Image (cartoon, rainbow, N blue to C red):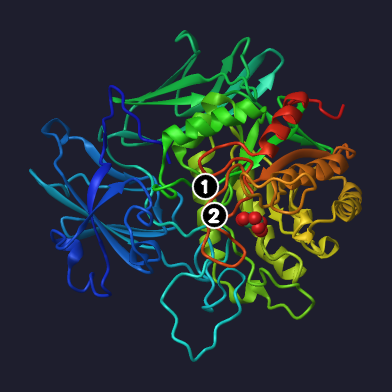
Amino acid sequence: MLYPILNDARAVIDLGGIWRFRLDDGSGVEQGWQARRLENCDTIAVPASYNDQKEGEAFRDHYGLAFYQTEFSVPSLLTQERLVLRFGAVTHHAQVYLNGNLMISHKGGFLPFEVEISGMVRDGSNLLTVVVDNRIDHSTLPVGCETPGQLGGMIPADPEITLKKQNYPNFDFFNYAGIVRPVKLYSTPKAFIEDLTVVPSVHGNDAELSYEVRTCGSGEVSLTVTDEDGIEVAQASGASGQITIRNVRLWQPGNAYLYTVCVRFGTDCYTLPVGVRTVELQGNQFLINSRPFYFKGYGKHEDSYFRGRGLDEALNVKDLALMKWQGANSFRTSHYPYSEEMLRLCDREGIVVLDEAPAVGVNLNFGLSNHGNAINTYETIRTHEHHREVLRDLVARDKNHACVVMWIVANEADTASHPDSAVDYFQPLLSLVRECDPQKRPVSLVAIQNDYRKDKAMLLSDVVCLNRYYGWYVYGGDLEAAKQALAKELDYWAQTGKPVMFTEYGADTVSGLHLATPTMFTEEYQVDYYRANNEVADRYPNFIGEQVWNFADFATSQGILRVDGNKKGLFSRDRRPKLAAHYFRQRWHEIPDFDYKH
Ligand code: BDP
């Protein structure tokens, strides 16, 4: 799905700002709130999660529907155009009403959707209502628990006690909800460019771009490619074909270079920034532009004060600046697809991205010790079809991004308790991504700390992506034991011949808590923890990267394991560096992006 842009053929109008808002009273839809001006309503900012914008548990812990509403008029110069209403993301389920008519329903909170509204808009004011549902369960991604009372490590509830209605996330981040990314009204000519796919390859000094343009209506397709100075370097005509760029400048991690592909079709026009780079696996190495790449970076969250998971472009710019300050080169979009704005920024800044589906919590044994009597997640969960849907949509949205070098199908799924069921569930999903991705990038699962010898599903992954907490959840406070256990595990993975990396490792750390003889939660312990793990991982030539958990502290549900959220950040939630941030700053500036272990 193309990102909406403004040019001589297309207009984009941002509908963000202050909207009317009302939490459902249980019968809002029956009462027809979606079809008339909301009464007794609040103000709310769009885009942003609603939870932290007002005070009170009703807002923060709301369970169910919320109504968003605004009004807009279409400039008369656009009324002859094709008009599309587009949502960057609405978490987790949206029903969009225009003047009381249901235009589209969309399930899944982290990917865009759009609906054509030409012919449906009135002269003058149009009433736009979005009914948002934040409920999560065994059919949604991310997954919610269906048994109440299991929140954050607390003792299960007495069934005779009445509990408040709330979500029970089967994952470790706050279940922020709302219209979290931009809402845009855009126009195209009636005959328009629907999609564009570009696949780069490199041959000596030159690059070849295979392209395919999907159009609607009749007309001729032509393309030009310009470099960063605006000089045309290649051109072509026809809806698909190859273009050669002579003496190509590659998109490199930390040193991005973006060409602009401009497609014309009739009176329509679309421009796409394209980085030319290659990605492939060779033996146990991950090659970018034919050289062994070493991932230095983080798992992140889209998370900030007040906005929750709402798009914040200043914060995105700041985060990438902090990454460069630290000498990092990459991050994973844990645990859901991030905004298109962030991926465009990473293309621009040369930050490498592991692009993850919103599949977290596909593990109904989360927190149990899997000693044979665990339930079979895959017989109970109802995510099978939706998981296919989100993977298809994710690849369709992000296929052209140079920054994206690998797809992550799920985080910490239940892969060891019923290994064959896990393979049956995941094999088709990994194949689907491999099939859908025109650039054929590697595809992986992210493994939970488990009995790895039983984990057959991880062998389906192109890269063994490990979330490991040796020295925290396992052998916490005993870093010598942690080192032994990590080495034992890395020996196991080494004989599979696959590349291996950390997609998570970390220790909760309270900013400002110091001890000369470190214990868990102190800033010194976090540094010692990382030193111990890095010392072991550095010995393995097939160990191709370290992504810490987490870039910054972030909000979670309340629970006995979390004090004001998850504190595993190298930075606090307001982006102040902990001691470990300085440790990694030194380490990562010494580790090259390429050929680290060669
Ligand atoms: C892993 C999860 C991540 C958690 C982290 C932790 O992938 O979402 O936040 O561990 O416990 O289980 O801090």
Image spot of residue 392 (x, y percent): 52, 50
Image spot of residue 521 (x, y percent): 69, 52
Q: Is residue 590 left or right of residue 173?
A: right
Q: Is residue 26 above or below residue 314?
A: below
Q: Is residue 50 above or below residue 261?
A: below
Look at the numbered disc 1 and give the secondary structure of its residue.
Answer: loop
* Residue labelled with disc 2: 358
Mark 2: few/some/many CA within 10 Å (<14, 14-19, 20+): many
* Residue labelled with disc 1: 337
Q: In terms of image quadrants, where is residue 7?
A: top left
| Kind of residue sitting beneath label 1 | Pro
Look at the numbered disc 2 and give the secondary structure of its residue.
Answer: loop
| Kind of residue sitting beneath label 2 | Pro
Q: Residue at x 42, y 34 (%)?
A: 313
Q: Nearer the viewer, residue 272 or 445?
A: 445
Q: Which residue extends farthest front?
A: 516
Q: Is residue 463 above or below residue 249?
A: below
Q: Are marks 2 and 1 in contact (CB under 8 Å)?
A: yes
Rendered-image quarter of ligand 1: bottom right
Q: Residue at x 79, y 58 (%)?
A: 476
Q: Which residue extends farthest bottom?
A: 160
Q: Quadrant of the N terminus?
A: top left
Q: In terms of image quadrants, where is residue 324?
A: top right
Q: Is residue 418 left or right of residue 557?
A: right
Q: Is residue 584 left or right of residue 386?
A: right
